[in-house]
Amino acid sequence: MSNKRGGGSIILATFLVGYMLSQMPLPQFAEWFRPEWVAMILIYWVMALPERVGLGTAALVGLGLDLIKGSPMGLNVLSLLIITYLTLLLYKRLRMFPLIQQAVMVMMLVGINQLIFNWVHNLMGTRSDSLIFLLPALMSAILWPWLFVILRGLRRAFRVA
């Protein structure tokens, strides 16, 4: 019983670190290169513990991200729910993939996230004429193997199950 509580605090701590990384100041030219930390952490935990981290967690994490970023309420909730649902459908396959294939899948999932954001911003009138909005998906894929190894190490060290 206490093992689950400890595991829950580790999961929560990783999301808090993801929130901090998503708000870390970057130079103006590097803003488009910021990976989607919270989405990647959510993908990892859904893959690793689908019975504990699912759609409810995605909704709460997305709501927190909406509040932190000041984005239209529900936008992050919607995008993270879609990513979580797709990850729940594919988690058994994703676990079997080597890290490079997982990174490609993460790029696609984060790309879906970015497409939803771009679509909503286009509806609001802030239009983007290029595909630069997809750069965070590429950066997330590049950083996925390292994030995966770090989170797996944390999960094993603290026996999160």
Image (tube, rainbow, N blue to C red):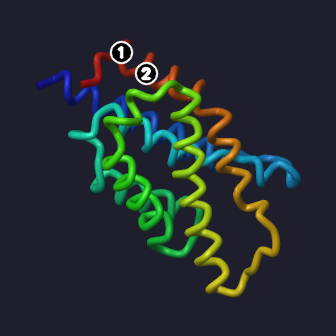
Q: Where is residue 120 in the image (x, y as percent from the top left)?
A: 59, 78
- Please name the residue that numbered disc 2 is placed on: 152
Does dot 1 land on a helix, a strand or a loop? Answer: helix
Does dot 2 land on a helix, a strand or a loop? Answer: helix
Q: Do the residues labelled 2 and 1 touch (CB within 8 Å)?
A: yes
Q: Nearer the viewer, residue 144 or 93?
A: 93
What distance separates the C-alpha of mark 2 from that of mark 1?
Answer: 6 Å
- Please name the residue that numbered disc 1 is placed on: 156
Determine crowd level at label 1: few under 14, some 14-19, many 20+ residues with C-alpha closer than 10 A: few
Q: Tell me if 59 is positioned left or right of 39 in this view.
A: left
For this orientation, the residue located farthest to the right is 29
For the point 65% across and 77% down, the residue is 121
Q: Where is residue 60 in the image (x, y as percent from the top left)?
A: 35, 57
Q: Where is residue 141 in the image (x, y as percent from the top left)?
A: 63, 39
For the point 76% across and 47% down, the residue is 33
In the drawing, what numbered circle is on residue 135? none
User: What amino acid type is highlighted by mark number 2?
Assistant: Arg
For this orientation, the residue located farthest to the left is 1
